[in-house]
Amino acid sequence: MSKDKLCLIIVWSLSALVATLAFIAWGNDLSWQFGHLNTYLFFPLLGLLAFSVMWSHYVAGTLRELMDVDQTRLTNYYRYTGYAVLTLICLHPGLLIYQLFRDGAGLPPLSYERYVAPGLGWITLLGTASLLIFLAFEFRRIYAKHSWWHFVPEAGDFAMLAIFYHGLRLGSQLRHAGWFVTVWWFYGITLTVIIARSYAKKYANKKARR
């Protein structure tokens, strides 16, 4: 088996695995009772799936580099999973905003503050800011050649860390100690290492060119 094909199998399998873990954690939180499923119970699943698959993107990039696989080999992987992530990150807050409005809570940020515990409203806004950063990345085909564009993916890295914290503080599946809390911390630690490694590499390359 070629390393290109092996890399593809690993990254697709990883994305499927983390998506499955997110679904299991969500299902466990509901005790697998879906008879009274509503928007408030459903929308957290979309956030878990979005972050988990985005995390797998970071791992896939590092794995591709370590295996010395051409980035074009993962084009379809990033395209299809990217479409899924884009849909999920829009629906996750979108469904909550819609339901809160229907229930008379108004619009963000006030509706957010009425939904979460006192003092945690700013964390919901942190999630909204991260969403806007991720959406800005979709304009890469238009602006990627501009000198300032590198700030957008860099902001995306910090947005990922913000979403990790957002989920840790607000995620109903992460409120109690359990196996998924351990998984979530694993995501956060490995994400931090991957991001730190990428910036260290950029700094080393920039220093080498001087």
Image (cartoon, rainbow, N blue to C red):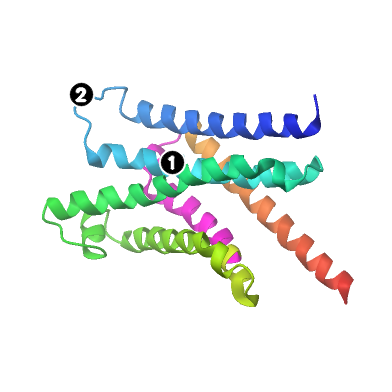
Residue at 48% x, 28% y is: 20
Quadrant showing the C terminus: bottom right
Residue 44, by quadrant, is: top left
- 30 and 146: which one is in front? 146
Counting residues from the start of the chain, the first of labels 2 and 1 encountered is: 2
Residue 113, by quadrant, is: bottom left
- 94 and 139: which one is in front? 139
The reply to whether residue 175 is in sight is no
**Crowding at mark 1 (Cα within 10 Å: few <14, some 14-19, many 20+):** many
User: Residue 176 location in percent, x, y?
Assistant: 40, 37
Is residue 161 on the magenta stretch? Answer: yes
Q: Can you name the residue that lies furthest to the front here?
A: 142
* Residue indicated by mark 2: 35
Tag 1: residue type? Leu
* Residue indicated by mark 1: 48
Q: Secondary structure at mark 1?
A: helix
Residue at 49% x, 38% y is: 181
Tag 2: residue type? Gly
Q: Is residue 19 above or below residue 127?
A: above
Q: Does 150 sit left or right of 207 as displayed?
A: left
User: Residue 60 location in percent, x, y?
Assistant: 66, 42
Q: Is residue 188 above or below residue 15?
A: below
Quadrant showing the N terminus: top right
Residue at 80% x, 43% y is: 66
Residues tagged 2 and 1 counted as in contact (Cβ below 8 A) = no
User: Residue 128 location in percent, x, y?
Assistant: 38, 60
Region of the chain picked out in magenta, as a range: 154-178
